[in-house]
Image (cartoon, grey):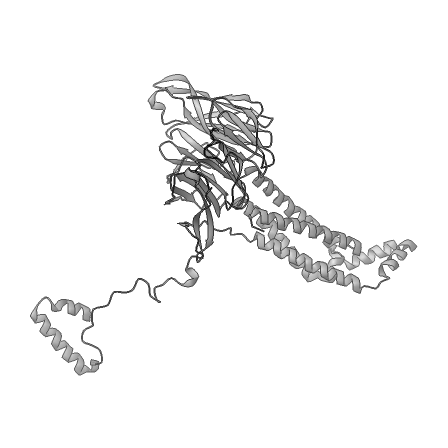
Amino acid sequence: MIRKKRGWVSTSSVTVGIALLLGVLFASLGWAQQPAARKPLARKPAATAATAVPAAEQPKYKGIFEPVNYSEDLDFTDVFFVSADVGWVSGAAGTILKTTDGGQTWTPQLGGDPKSQEPAIYRLRFIDEIHGWAMQRKKLLRTTDGEAWEQIGSVKDVHGDYVFLSETEGLCLQGTIGHTKIWRTSDSGRNWTEVFDCQTKIELEGLRRDVACVVTSLHFPSPQIGYGVGFVGSGVHGALKDILILVKTEDAGATWNLSVVRDIGPAVEVFFADENTGFIHVWQGKMYKTTDGGETWSGVVASPGNEIKFADPEVGWSFYGATLTYTTDGGKRWSARNFTFPARNDAFSLPRRDRGYVAGLHGMIYRYRVVPATEEVAKAILAPAMPGVDSPLDEQVEQLQGQVAALEEEVRKEQEEAAPGAEQAAAQKEEAGGGEAGAQESGAAGSGGSGLVENCCAEKVEQIQATVDAVATEVPKFTGKYRNLNLIFVGLGLVGQLFGQAQTLKDSFNTLRKARDPQSVTAALTELTNQVTGLVQNTKTAFQKQE
């Protein structure tokens, strides 16, 4: 109120007089301890103890790009990492380099000399840590140990993409400008057979026209289901420039079906996170999404680059020059961030959500990591922090491992404390015709279907049962959110392993609970321990934890 009155003071001398009289009146009423007018408030600091973000809400992690450059002036065309630390870059002068320590050191496998006249190597493709392919003009190169490379075959007039589904099965796009054919190999690329000729019928101005089409990009979300996208070939009427060509296979590329989607535009890139959910980038710089295997498409608010890659079903990247467009919720929402790399980046790899690599001109390679917010890294470029893996599965299996070990120890003690001749007496009783009675006694001891282990260690058994049930429930949730999409076939294999192990774990535990003699208990415990150990290792692999 007083501040308002001070605001009035400057308007007229009459108001000043009134304000003074009121001040005297307030003082006479006992309000003299309060100033009649306040001094102007000083400018508040940017952050005070009252307004500062609580420590608990401060970011604990940050993302960074840090240089892990090659020591020679080489222009890189591609980069592919099969894990957080193992990867390759390829480029000018017939170069392929490998690292096994996240880019700290690079070893030339081919080339590496910037003065070499060898043609550039590009389009790296790997299905695991040892099986990979690369292109050098019309040569198809292959490695089967992740170290040595050979020319496995040749391809003619390659127009776009190629993929391998296994050590031997693969597909590639070949053809001329304006017309693509899909070819398939069953011998790792030595020989190719045509399986699809991209042609279709288009209605234009009321007339049906036979037109050739181009497929620019291939992607397989599973070993059987694959997609390709493209556009109507060059030289066709301009009214067809808004047409998307979509081809799909459900038999590992042996046969393909083509569909035409209008009002979207020619596509240059495709990536499917699963058999139904996919994204495409069209020439106009737009992104579209499907959740029904390409039957329908909806526009996405994003500015994608030529390539779209997902580390897992939630986290995906797309680079356009120095601009990273990314999602952390499966493509529902995309954000963009610009970076000041010292040279143009022409390729990127995203082996997992908290590790990525970009490569480009003049030997430039930058590594993305998520680090503690307080960590200082020389020459690092600040970047958004991708979210961590939020699943209790890893803790659950480690807890289970401890519980099984504790049960094993208690059972061992129980067996040691048992009378040394108990087993021999039971055997003699069995031989003397007491088998049926012994069985009845054993059944009584384990009434309700319970076995020997529950009689000694019921509390620990119930704890393990609860954890086993929790693990079995969590496995499908985990695999649905975090399965590896960088190496789709390795990721799918791991998903199958986790599902199988979860079921086998339940079976092994049920066997243990029903065991009615010490020998059966020991055997069942050993099997359960082995199952848990394998599950612990596989969950570490699934979470891509470093040892």
Task: Count numbered badges in the picture.
Answer: 0
**Position of residue 476 measured from the top left corner of the image (x, y, whole percent):** 57, 46
Q: Quadrant of residue 200?
A: top left
Q: Residue furthest front?
A: 115
Q: Is residue 344 depicted above or below 521 in this figure?
A: above
| Horizontal relation, residue 72 to residue 171: left or right | left
Q: Is residue 20 depicted above or below 531 in this figure?
A: below
User: Is residue 362 visible in the rendered structure shown here?
Assistant: yes
Name the residue nearer the viewer: 63 or 289.
Answer: 63
Q: Is residue 217 depicted above or below 375 in this figure?
A: above
Name the residue nearer the viewer: 268 or 280.
Answer: 268
User: Is residue 485 visible in the rendered structure shown here?
Assistant: no
Image quarter in which the N terminus is found = bottom left
Residue at the image point whose x is 12% and y is 69% from the top: 9
**Position of residue 86 measured from the top left corner of the image (x, y, whole percent):** 54, 43
Q: Residue furthest right?
A: 432
Q: Residue furthest left?
A: 13
**Position of residue 27 measured from the top left corner of the image (x, y, whole percent):** 17, 81
Name the residue nearer the viewer: 391 or 355.
Answer: 355
Q: Is residue 365 depicted above or below 17 in this figure?
A: above
**Position of residue 469 measured from the top left corner of the image (x, y, whole percent):** 62, 52
Q: Quadrant of residue 284?
A: top left
